[in-house]
Image (cartoon, rainbow, N blue to C red):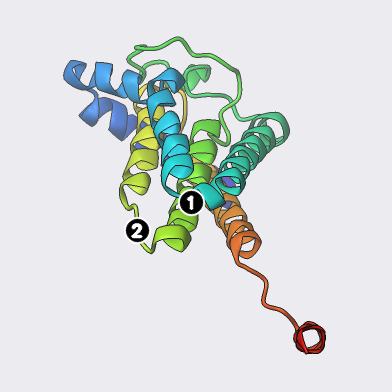
Amino acid sequence: MSFLQWADKVDKQLFTFVHHYLGNPILDAPMLFLRYPPVWVPLYLFIIYWAIRHHKKYAVKFILLSIVTVSFTDFISAKVVKPFAGRLRPCHAADMQPVLRHILDCGGMYSFPSSHASNHFGLAAFWFGAILFITGKKWHWLWVWAGLICFAQVYVGVHYPFDVTCGALFGLATGTITATIFKRWATPKMPTDGQMEIAKTTTV
């Protein structure tokens, strides 16, 4: 058995565990709710309001790089990697049908990686790093938010655990990079020795 075959077997076992032992009618509605994009519009509006209202000098850069982060993660995961990897969603895979509870329509054909995981962990990583730079505060709840959305993807049957894990890692890397760009972009540039000498000469 190759490594990829072993990884696929373990992934499907984890997926089966979630659906067999954690699936519960009480959790169905919250899990469906968590992965529905319009649900999070108030959060996005709050983040935009927070940036503009409390940190105006950073707001444009913060909002622009938020858009860049999620645009990049979504495009690469959905338009580049998914068609290349060609891994079927569990809800499209014949061997997974006995495991599934079918609480949601299957949607797109391909599963790897999860764009939900890529996008939300990308935003979480960018916001965490940028907000830490701006305020010195750590918004740990961002990781919980992104993690719950990832788990919901597995719970409703549209992704395997490996899909959301790799998507989350990709998002984390992307968000970390854009947060670093934000910090450098937002840090005031110190004048060079030559510029200081010119300024002194001009003043005299």
Q: Are marks 1 and 2 in contact (CB under 8 Å)?
A: no
Q: Which residue does the image show at 44% across and 19% down from the upper left?
A: 38
What residue is disc 1 on? 125
Query: In the picture, which quadrant includes the C terminus?
Result: bottom right
Q: Provide the secondary structure element on which disc 1 rests.
A: helix
Which of these two is toward me, 160 or 27?
Answer: 27
As drawn, the label of residue 138 is 2
Q: Amino acid at mark 1?
A: Ala
Mark positioned earlier in the residue sequence (1 or 2): 1
Q: Residue furthest front?
A: 204
Spot occupied by residue 118 in the image (x, y as percentages of width and height): 54, 40
- Please tell me in which quadrant of the rendered image residue 145 appears: top left
Examine the rendered structure and indicate whether residue 45 appears above or below residue 188.
above
Q: Is residue 18 visible?
A: yes
Which of these two is toward me, 76 or 58?
Answer: 58
Q: Amino acid at mark 2?
A: Lys
Callout 2 crowding tier (Cα within 10 Å): few <14, some 14–19, many ≥20? some
The reply, left or right, for residue 202 in relation to residue 22 is right
The reply, left or right, for residue 79 in relation to residue 62 is right
Q: Which residue does the image show at 26% across and 18% down from the upper left?
A: 28
Q: How many marks?
A: 2
Spot occupied by residue 163 in the image (x, y as percentages of width and height): 51, 38
Examine the rendered structure and indicate whether residue 203 appears above or below residue 155.
below
The reply, left or right, for residue 171 in relation to residue 156 is right
Q: Which residue does the image show at 61% across and 37% down from the upper left?
A: 67
As drawn, the label of residue 115 is none
Q: Residue furthest left?
A: 26
Q: Is residue 1 visible?
A: no
